[in-house]
Image: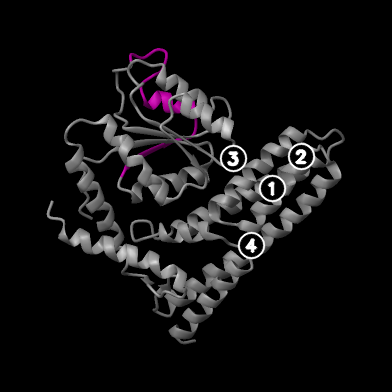
Amino acid sequence: MEIGNLQRRYLDFASTLFHEGFLDNQFTQLQQLQDESSPEFVLEVVTLFFEDSEKLLDELSRTLNQQAVDFKKVDAHVHQLKGSSASIGAQRVKNVCVAFRNCCEEMNQEGCLRCLRQVRNEYFLVKNKLETLFALEQQIVAAGGSVPMMW
Amino acid sequence: MAVDTETQFHVLAVDDSLLDRKLIERLLKTSSFQVTTVDSGSKALEVLGLREDQQPEHNEIEVNLVITDYCMPGMTGYDLLKKIKESSSLKDIPVVIMSSENVPSRINRCLEGGAEEFFLKPVQLSDLKRLRPHILKGKSKEQETENTTIISTSTGTTSSSGSNKRTAIAIDEDLAPNKRTRLRFSSSSSLTLV
């Protein structure tokens, strides 16, 4: 596929991610911080987010499926997940975390389990979107083009 | 990469989250600060030369500003702030606190405890502009020349980054002002004859 088409596809895809709320302005901030001295910055940070999140999701599952749930511990994990999703601009994940923390405060196990399912869904959705975004970037570069900026 | 190293200010960044450490480091480097990151308050005190078995003057690295996360296991950012302000050798080092939570009582407590600024996370490049007046406070008369140097260095970095893999295409009217701002900085950097 020709470079112009690849670039257009990339921009369209990226644009939908923002319009559908998967990503917010913080993600753009990350892209603006990437340059030749740190050419893989966004990928590195997003990879950290993936690693962090999957560990946290496992922990959350373990902690919430116990007889006596330690809601303080659950809240601490959700706080961390909220923080890292906010740091990379994963808006929908962050928003579920806000609701999740409310359930922790109410010590509502049912509610927490529901939030966990939701946050897990949102996480895997955004992970998939980001992987697609990076793959589109690689296609452009492989074709000899440059990745257009979205701002 | 002609960065003016003689007058780079050194910032010590403290955060238990690896992701956030990476982010703050990048933000600070992009703003032309020299950066050291640590993952806890106690490590921060070590770097500052404030271990119990050490004299403060011994082996310490010069730090011009500390920026720390509030919520950390063990020593919180607030605890670290107090330790710094209570130390005769370190009390003049400006401290900035970051937090993902907007809790007015927490913010006031930190400011009253001697913090210069309180940043809400995620911290952005525009927030770091608020650091400069505090760094300058800590230094002597070379301040103004250094300030100019920093500005020209950071715009130098920005203007050189437009090449290689990225092509600027403004797809949104609203985003155009940002592009204009960047262009303004790069044209002034070409005029700076430092």
Q: Name the residue located 39 percent from the left edge and 79 percent from the top edge.
A: A144
Q: What residue type is labelled 3?
A: Glu
| Mark 3, residue position | B101
Q: Does the magenta stretch include residue B116?
A: no
Q: In this view, does B66 lie above or below A102?
A: above
Both labels 2 and 4 in a single chain: yes
Q: Cβ–Cβ below 8 Å for labels 2 and 3? A: no
| Mark 2 belongs to chain | A
Q: What residue type is labelled 2?
A: Cys
Disc 2 secondary structure class: helix
Judge the density around disc 4: few (<14), some (14-19), many (≥20) Cα neighbours within 10 Å. Answer: many
Both labels 1 and 4 in a single chain: yes
Judge the density around disc 3: few (<14), some (14-19), many (≥20) Cα neighbours within 10 Å. Answer: some
| Mark 4, residue position | A126
Q: Which of marks 3 and 4 is in front?
A: 3
Q: Name the residue located 51 percent from the left edge and 47 percent from the top edge.
A: B122
Disc 1 secondary structure class: helix
Label 2 vs label 4: CA separation? 24 Å
| Mark 1, residue position | A98
Q: Please give left or right for residue B149 compared with residue A116 in the image.
A: left
Label 2 vs label 3: CA separation? 16 Å
Q: Position of residue B183 (x, y in %)?
A: 29, 66
Label 3 vs label 1: CA separation? 11 Å
Q: Where is residue B77 in the image (x, y as percent from the top left)?
A: 51, 29
| Mark 3 belongs to chain | B
Q: In this view, does B91 lie above or below B106?
A: above
Disc 4 secondary structure class: helix
Q: Is residue B38 magenta?
A: yes
Which residue reaches farthest left? Answer: B193
Q: Name the residue located 34 percent from the left edge and 47 percent from the top edge.
A: B29
Which residue reaches farthest bottom? Answer: A2
Q: Which mark is residue A104?
A: 2
